[in-house]
Image (spheres, rainbow, N blue to C red):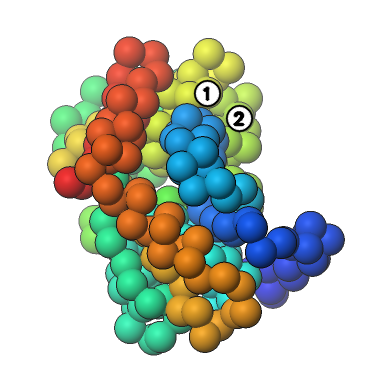
């Protein structure tokens, strides 16, 4: 019911904006938008192709639902298995890896644990935790992490709470409450100066966060698919990949190109 309401609200917003033919509709995740990356790279696309990019930022689950409804030209999301299923089911015409970074656990204090399994047990036994609970790519990954380490969130007590919010809002709530949460590194670093949170546990290889671009099947909508093809080819092009790799925040590279 929550997902249906979210998608309905987004559709209403899109109807009010009444996209024009010289506009590309990019539906992406709140983590990408909050990081500041799109504001950094999109002007290059707009200048080269003389096309305005309208960005709608939601959780990956909602983004995929909008894609199924044809309310997008291109998706930029991060839930690999769901993305492949989306394309295999005919909603997407093609998909490619674009970039990656990693997930991290953050909280009021650094944990002394050295493994992911021990980190989860430490949180379960001693701390409160905020889950996004919004069917986003981050939420999906968080649930898989618990499951892969022998835990079921349905069995958790009151220490485990859902925000139902995007990554930025969840980080702010986590900071104010003194809880722990899972976040992508890029959003955390982009908000660092406004957060009272530190990295509690990190393992870049174990918690890799892969992003992919999907061109929506043109049979799903009546928009000009040329812009979608242009964006799809542009974002995986070598010079754009290099541009993605130059986005720095707090002296750290936030995204690593796949090419």
Left/right of residue 76 with respect to residue 14 in the rendered view = left
Which residue position holds label 2? 172
Residue 245 image point, x, y percent: 28, 31
Mark 2 in CB contact with mark 1 (< 8 angstroms): yes
Point out the frontmost of discs 2 and 1. 1
Q: How many marks?
A: 2
Task: Give 146 or 240, whichever is nearer the viewer.
Answer: 240
Q: Which mark is on residue 252?
A: none
Residue 244 image point, x, y percent: 33, 35
Specify the quadrant that holds the N terminus.
bottom right
Report crowding for label 1: few under 14, some 14 to 19, many 20 or more residues within 10 A (C-alpha): some
The residue under the point 39% across, 86% down is 89
What is the spatial separation of the Cα atoms under label 2 and label 1, in whole angstroms? 9 Å
Residue 7 image point, x, y percent: 68, 68
- Can the viewer see residue 48 in this picture? yes
Task: Give 119 or 250, whichever is nearer the viewer.
Answer: 250
Left/right of residue 188 with respect to residue 54 in the rendered view = left
Which residue position holds label 1? 191
Is residue 71 depicted above or below 246 in this figure?
Answer: below
Choose the circle earlier in sequence order: 2 or 1.
Answer: 2
Element carrying mark 2:
helix
* Location of residue 76 (image quadrant): bottom left
The residue under the point 50% across, 61% down is 227
Element carrying mark 1:
loop
The residue under the point 28% across, 61% down is 96
Residue 56 image point, x, y percent: 62, 53
The residue under the point 36% across, 26% down is 247
Task: Give 20 or 85, whichever is nearer the viewer.
Answer: 20
* Location of residue 86 (image quadrant): bottom left
Is residue 94 depicted above or below 43 in this figure?
Answer: below
Report crowding for label 2: few under 14, some 14 to 19, many 20 or more residues within 10 A (C-alpha): some
């Amino acid at each position: 019911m929550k997902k249906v309401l979210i998608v309905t609200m987004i559709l209403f917003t899109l109807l009010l904006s009444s996209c024009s033919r010289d506009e590309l509709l990019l539906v992406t995740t709140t983590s990408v938008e909050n990081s500041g990356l799109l504001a950094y790279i999109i002007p290059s696309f707009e200048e080269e192709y003389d096309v305005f990019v309208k960005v709608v930022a939601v959780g990956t689950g909602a983004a995929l639902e909008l894609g199924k409804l044809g309310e997008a030209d291109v998706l930029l999301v991060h839930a690999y298995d769901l993305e492949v299923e989306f394309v295999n089911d005919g909603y997407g015409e093609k998909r490619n890896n674009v970039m990656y970074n990693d997930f991290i656990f953050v909280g009021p204090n650094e944990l002394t644990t050295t493994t992911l399994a021990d980190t989860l047990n430490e949180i379960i036994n001693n701390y409160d935790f905020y889950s996004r609970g919004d069917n986003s790519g981050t939420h999906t990954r968080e649930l898989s992490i618990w499951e892969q380490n022998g835990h079921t969130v349905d069995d958790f007590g009151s220490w485990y709470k859902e925000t139902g919010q995007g990554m930025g809002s969840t980080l702010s709530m986590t900071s104010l409450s003194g809880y722990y949460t899972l976040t992508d590194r890029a959003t955390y670093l982009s908000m660092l100066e406004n957060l009272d949170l530190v990295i509690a546990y990190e393992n870049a290889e174990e918690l890799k966060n892969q992003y992919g671009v999907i061109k929506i099947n043109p049979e799903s909508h009546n928009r000009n698919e040329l812009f979608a093809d242009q964006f799809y080819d542009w974002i995986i092009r070598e010079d754009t990949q290099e541009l993605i790799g130059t986005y720095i925040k707090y002296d750290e590279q936030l995204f690593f190109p796949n090419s």
